[in-house]
């Protein structure tokens, strides 16, 4: 792998965040996973503002973004990230319990790179997130 990078996980549900982290670890993506619990924290982290103003430079290699979060909704976070030339290249995967076509359409309209409906079954969830992590962190190539 040329650029190991890190994953930014934005999810307000601690159980979902823990399951996602474990699934990523099973997929071999355990190097560096940063978890934030709301949309404002996600933006602060990406844009190095607020409590993250002094974090090391660099964009996540992958962002896993819950659609419905407190403070700032996931789709608003997505729109702000994709509107900025410095953060636009960050691959953003929407992870949602919604399988509504309207939610998927809105996500892709805001330039989501992928949309994953969170399976209820633990084994299926783990397998999907493991595959997702392996693809974006090991197979996909990025600039820089």
Image (cartoon, helix red, strand yellow):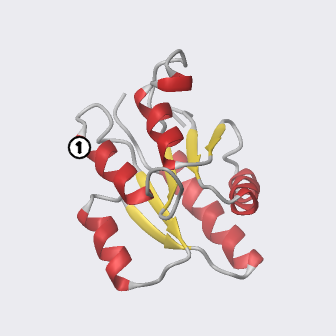
Viewer-closest of 26 and 56: 56
Say whether residue 66 is left or right of residue 27.
Answer: left
Say whether residue 84 is left or right of residue 21.
Answer: left
**Label 1 packing within 10 angstroms: few (<14), some (14-19), many (20+):** few
Viewer-closest of 74 and 129: 74
Q: Where is residue 19 in the image (x, y as percent from the top left)?
A: 74, 61
- Indicate the quadrant where residue 128 lies: bottom right
- Indicate the quadrant where residue 8 lies: top right
**Quadrant housing the N terminus:** top right
Q: Position of residue 80 (x, y in %)?
A: 30, 45
| Label 1 residue SS | helix
Relative to 18, is 90 above or below?
A: above
Residue at left offset 44%, top offset 51%: 72
Q: Position of residue 116 (x, y in %)?
A: 50, 71
Relative to 1, is 11 above or below?
A: below
Relative to 15, is 121 above or below?
A: below
**Quadrant housing the C terminus:** top left
Residue at left offset 44%, top offset 38%: 43
Viewer-closest of 37 and 60: 37
Say whether residue 122 is left or right of residue 60.
Answer: right
The residue beneath circle 1 is 83
Say whether residue 64 is left or right of residue 24.
Answer: left
Badge count? 1
Residue at left offset 37%, top offset 59%: 75
């Amino acid at each position: 792998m040329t650029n190991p990078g890190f994953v930014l996980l934005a999810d307000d549900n601690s159980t979902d965040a823990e399951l996602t982290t474990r699934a990523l670890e099973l997929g071999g993506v355990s190097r560096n996973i940063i978890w934030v619990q709301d949309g404002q924290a996600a933006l602060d982290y990406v844009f190095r503002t607020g409590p993250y103003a002094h974090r090391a430079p660099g964009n996540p290699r992958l962002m896993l973004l819950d659609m419905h979060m407190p403070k700032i909704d996931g789709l608003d976070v997505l729109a702000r990230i994709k509107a900025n030339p410095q953060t636009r290249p960050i691959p953003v995967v929407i992870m949602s319990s919604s399988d509504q076509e309207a939610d998927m359409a809105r996500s892709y309209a805001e330039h989501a790179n992928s949309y994953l409906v969170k399976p209820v079954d633990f084994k299926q969830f783990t397998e999907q997130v493991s595959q997702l992590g392996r693809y974006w962190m090991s197979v996909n190539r990025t600039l820089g």
